[in-house]
């Protein structure tokens, strides 16, 4: 299973008025061979000096009922959803030489720092630009259209949270998001289609200048419930072919 698929599925949406204790669970089964579950939790911390939200997520992918991949994530985000710091850890360790965990710190100007390291659980880290093992990237280096201090850099979680906190409509077709997917940079172009009075289809496409792997992270589309402010399903590319993940209502806890 491509780690890109697992990573991208970690970052779906929460309620428009999310508070502590909210939880969403998504699951899929394919040909009785592959299955998986995605669990998302959000805490609202408006009184914290640094962050407004804290997000946690866990992805588990099974092949023949045996755990094949696991990815854990934690992040702290501002009130406008832009990330401050995040960390991802995956099991088993990647075979391409990458480390099991990567921590990231984000600035308001499109710059972000990252550090790869070995650990079993993700922990938020403060990364110093002077450390030898810390690298720096900038969105403006890859995208000429990126406006420093105006355009936002999203991580995976904040990108998918966006529709819940900032209403989307058919007029948002063509809207561009700049997103950091681990060490990859991408420009995601949104297309919005109306399925019914209560449902929108959100189609995601990688824009010009995006790293080649970004297309593997991005789901083909998501179905968004306008009234409940929640993604009810999304279509992902996997080794099993296209897979539809559905919201498990009985296991999820929504405040609205």
Image (tube, helix red, strand yellow):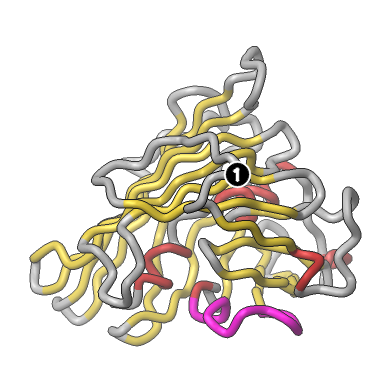
Q: Residues within 10 Å of mark 1 (few under 14, many from 20)?
A: few
Q: Is residue 240 above or below residue 168?
A: below
Q: Residue 23 at x, y = what percent?
A: 42, 36
Q: Residue at x 61, y 61 (%)?
A: 180
> 17 and 130: which one is in front?
130
Say which residue label 1 marks: 130
Task: Name which quarter of the figure residue 252 lies in.
Answer: top left
Q: Is residue 59 left or right of residue 230?
A: left
Residue at horizontal 9%, vertical 65%? 66
Quick check: is 205 in the magenta stretch? no
**Camera-side residue: 43 or 133?**
133
Residue 57 image point, x, y percent: 39, 45
The N terminus appears in which quarter of the rendering?
Answer: bottom left
Q: Nearer the viewer, residue 123 or 12?
A: 123
Q: Is residue 169 above or below residue 132?
A: below
Q: Position of residue 248 (x, y in %)?
A: 35, 50
Q: Residue at x 82, y 67 (%)?
A: 175
Query: In the rendered view, does 99 fall on the left or right side of 220?
Result: left
Residue at position x 24%, y 45% from top? 120
- 81 or 27: nearer the viewer: 81
Region in magenta: 206-216
**Viewer can see residue 208:** yes
Q: Is residue 81 above or below residue 186?
A: above
- The quadrant holding residue 92 is bottom left
Per the picture, the main secondary structure of the magenta-coloured stretch is loop
| Residue 199, horizontal then vertical, whole percent | 65, 61
Along the horizontal axis of the image, is 143 left or right of 239? right
Q: Is residue 89 left or right of residue 20?
A: left
């Amino acid at each position: 299973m491509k780690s890109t698929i697992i990573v991208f599925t970690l970052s779906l949406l929460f309620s428009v008025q999310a508070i502590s204790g909210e939880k969403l669970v998504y699951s899929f089964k394919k040909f009785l061979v592959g299955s998986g579950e995605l669990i998302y939790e959000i805490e609202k911390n408006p009184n914290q000096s640094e962050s407004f939200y804290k997000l946690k997520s866990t992805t588990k992918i099974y092949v023949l009922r045996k755990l094949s991949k696991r990815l854990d994530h934690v992040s702290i985000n501002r009130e406008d959803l832009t990330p401050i710091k995040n960390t991802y850890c995956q099991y088993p360790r990647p075979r391409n030489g990458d480390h099991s965990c990567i921590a990231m710190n984000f600035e308001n100007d499109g710059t972000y720092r990252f550090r790869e390291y070995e650990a079993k659980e993700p922990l938020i880290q403060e990364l110093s630009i002077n450390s030898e093992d810390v690298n720096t990237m900038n969105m403006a280096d890859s995208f000429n259209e990126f406006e420093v201090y105006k355009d936002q850099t999203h991580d995976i979680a904040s990108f998918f949270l966006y529709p819940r906190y900032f209403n989307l409509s058919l007029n948002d077709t063509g809207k561009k998001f700049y997103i950091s997917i681990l060490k990859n940079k991408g420009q995601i172009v949104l297309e919005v289609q109306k399925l019914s009075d209560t449902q929108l289809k959100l189609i995601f496409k990688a824009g010009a200048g995006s790293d080649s792997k970004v297309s593997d992270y991005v789901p083909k589309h998501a179905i968004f419930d306008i009234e409940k402010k929640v993604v009810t399903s999304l279509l992902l590319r996997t080794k099993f072919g296209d897979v539809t993940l559905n919201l498990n209502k009985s296991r999820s806890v929504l405040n609205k």
